[in-house]
Amino acid sequence: MEKINLGRRSILRATAIAGGGMMLGLFPRREARAQAPAQAPGQGPGRGGFARAPLSPANFVSISPDGIASIGSPNTEMGQGSFNLLPMMVAEELDIDWKNVKIVRTGVGSEFGGQFTAGSTATPSNWVPMRQIGGAVRGMLIAAAAQNWGVPAAECSTTPGRVVHSPSGRAASYGELAAKAATMPVPDFSTLKFKDPKDYKIIGTTTLGGETKDIIRGKAQFGIDITVPGMLYAVFEKTPVSRGKVVSANLDAIKAMKGVKHAFIVEGAPVNGNYPNYLFADPGLEAGVAIVADSWWAAQSARKKLKVQWDLGQLAAQDSEQTVAKAEELSKQAPARTLRKDGDTDAVFQRTDIRVIQGAYRFPIIAHNTLEPQNATAHFRDGKVEVWSTSQLPQTGRQLVARVLGIPVNDVTVHMVRAGGGFGRRCYNDSMAEAAWISKTVGAPVKLLWTREDDVQHDYYRPGGFQYLKAAIDQNGKLAAWHDHYITYGEGNSFIAEGGFDAGQFPAGLIRDYQVQSSVLPLVLKTGALRAPGSNCSAWVVQSFVDDVAHAAGKDPLALRLELLASAPAPAAPASGPGGGPPGGGRPGLNAARMRGVLELVAEKSGWGKRQLPPRTALGIACHFDHGGHVAEVAEVTVSADKKIKVNKVWVAADVGSHAVNPGAAEHVLQGAVIDGLSELIQEITLKNGRVVQSNYDQHPVLRMPEAPPIEVHFLRTNNTPNGLGEPGLPPILPAVCNAIFKATGERIHTLPFTKQGFRFA
Amino acid sequence: MITLTINGKAQRYDGDSEMPLLWVLRDELNLKGTKFGCGMGLCGACTVHVNGEPVRSCLVSASDAAGKKITTIEGLSPDGTHPVQVAWEALDVPQCGYCQTGQIMTASALLAKKKNPTDADIDAAMAGNICRCGTYGRIRAAIHKASEGMKAGSTNR
């Protein structure tokens, strides 16, 4: 934890780690996922943020004499809510009033856990460790009081902020006890008893965002707001085509411009001798020209006069539109490989007593579009570097900076800063590497800030793809076989980063004869995780085609889903968590009962099948399991005769597990995920001559206020580990809206963005 | 030499007169509550009031701003308790929060003109402010709440 946040009054400084190491469940690999990138960010120890070793309470909690507990939040806050969430878990078991908690950011390093701000993992991965930290500190406070009073610790208990000894009526505040408590041994985590959830005072109660008061007064500090004494400002004109090189640039003319201090060519640095391995999205330092000036505006103004001669190589011949024809061609050939094969789909499709329906779906490359453009501030001096970053994976960024600069990881200090949106973009730490390189080159602290155009054109994009589906419906209207030919970018047996397909997703396992096969076509660009990676496109395809099947079979789309899910065997009940608490310490897979639960809830709340709707107005339904979350959504949509779409309302039902830790924030992040998913219906990135065509919000839009529907959120509480909600709320909205459009108009959206079929938001 | 009146205070600026007001505010005057999002007036993150009107400060040069009354988020109210800010806090509107100062400046300009805006008024006024996190529902509710707060406040006076 950074000393600067704690102040001198911080005196609880436990130093020992509990004896008897405890192993927590590691993030289970998604077996059905055909492809897991070998070098995916964060895939080191403790993947997914699930800690491998117990965390030291000293790195997370300090209590000052006035009884205020400073609790360290170890993950990056980018709007998803972990800044509050994780300290809330600590505070609950510490047993302290929330008003006496001050949330602080921890430093960056393995001593703070995985700090993996991705994959909706913060809640499930920290659910046990954060409560252990709180419980351990509470135990130390009790031990200190017991020693002071000469009574057995077992006779002491706590009320919020106080240790009490009922037999003698004595009590002492945490503030009074903190100094002594710091000298007590840290309890063995396996001996901790957790609260009975019915006694929770913080978990399950909405808390105000820890930085809301600052945000609305313009005082919150984002990455772009960092200043360091003596700091210069940088812009970076990066090769417009990945792997390009700079042949020459008019550097002398640039250096002569007002305010410009430095202008130089960055050659680009190999990372692990494997640069740049686009299939695995290993972020590195691309070539380009850096301009450093005494103000950002001066640097950016000079950049407008920059003339670079590039050597862009073969990738400058790429054109994404050509992949459409190529995919169509591949779809007619035998798939290159099989991702999952259950039963014998070929045999079913040859039967004469079945009907076959087919659907071809196409989704585009899209960008993240965080509102705060990528940036980082770096200060290299004496062989070491400090970096201020909004990274979602700050430990990965720290390692990248060390590799790019060729210095030990311990000589890289990273400071987490609040991020103006993440959505997966900040899993890739290219701006950190660039800022560090530029600072080292000029020998001064430097803030590197990208323009919006840089941000849109140098993303790690959500890859596009093509899916050719075929289903057999038997004479009883039953779905008898499902075949999917999935096509995306890649090479050989490898998909491009985050281009894999989860062949284990619904309706896998629910139909006897099921097969997913794949082929790849060449298109080389940097790709990466975008909120609900994999699911944000596959749910649209699968849940749209399930709707096609329902229509062809003459069944209600909800009824078909429930019927399929009913065929799954009942899953085992989850084990109770350590210390007698709710289930915890892992991530379950798709559970048909939980999915039925959210479908039934959303159907009830939306009045599915029970409401008379006006002409050209209809409901669409979809469900999906993503990143540990079961979510079902219904959209009510009106489509005008000229194809203008108004989403009148959305209903969300989300299984949150045993608790929505911070219910107000949980509701809000699910609403945000719906808006985000609606934006994906109208977005597209294309490559022409190897370059990204789109450059700003006019060409890669996001949903705006007049298009945003009211969104009603309902939680389904089940006896399971609380799960993350940042991602699972997104995937169902795309098919829910498209299924409603189909119901209202009879026209199926086969291609995104739906503007390609003439639709637009009203 | 340009004199800018920012949050009621005259500030001297002798740099590049073409520098957009956004960068003068952020990097010359250290008023960092005004954010950079797109540089083209497409996102609204840099919204400030110029003579009471909501304006994209990325599109206004320092020389164009000279002699006009400029209000930033830092100067919206003396103690950060403008009814819009109070409503924003009560409903915990932000997620990442990056757009929110711009949203608040646009919303407060709307309420200065229309004490009781309809949903259609809100749509029209706020359409230029992107919230990438999708907090539109709470923004709308907070504007209505601020409107109520302003009416209650004026009654009390």
Image: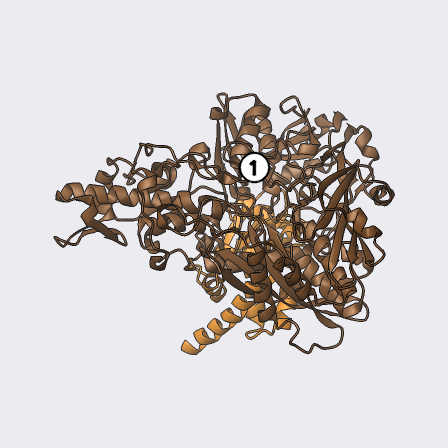
Chain colours: A brown, B orange
Mark 1 burial class by Cα count in 10 Å: few <14, some 14-19, many 20+: many
Left or right: B137 in relation to A147:
right
x, y percentage for residue A185? 26, 35
* Helix, strand or loop under label 1: strand
Front one among A681 and A419: A681
Give the mark count. 1
Residue at image position (20%, 49%) is A156
Write down the residue under mark 1: A376
Question: Residue A60 in the image: x percent, y percent?
Answer: 37, 40
Check disc 1 and give the amino acid type.
Answer: Ala
Front residue of this view, candidates A115 and B93: A115
Which image quarter: residue A490? top right
Tell me if A190 is positioned left or right of B35 in this view: left
Chain to which mark 1 belongs: A
Image coordinates of residue A392 in percent, x first then y, are 55, 41
Can the viewer see residue A403? Answer: yes
Which quadrant does the N terminus of chain B fall into? top right
Residue A63 seen in this snapshot: no
- Of B60 and A194, nearer the camera is A194
Q: Is residue A428 or residue A31 the one in the foreground?
A: A31
Quadrant position of residue B80:
bottom left
Does B41 sit above or below residue A182?
below
On the rendered structure, is A358 left or right of B113? right
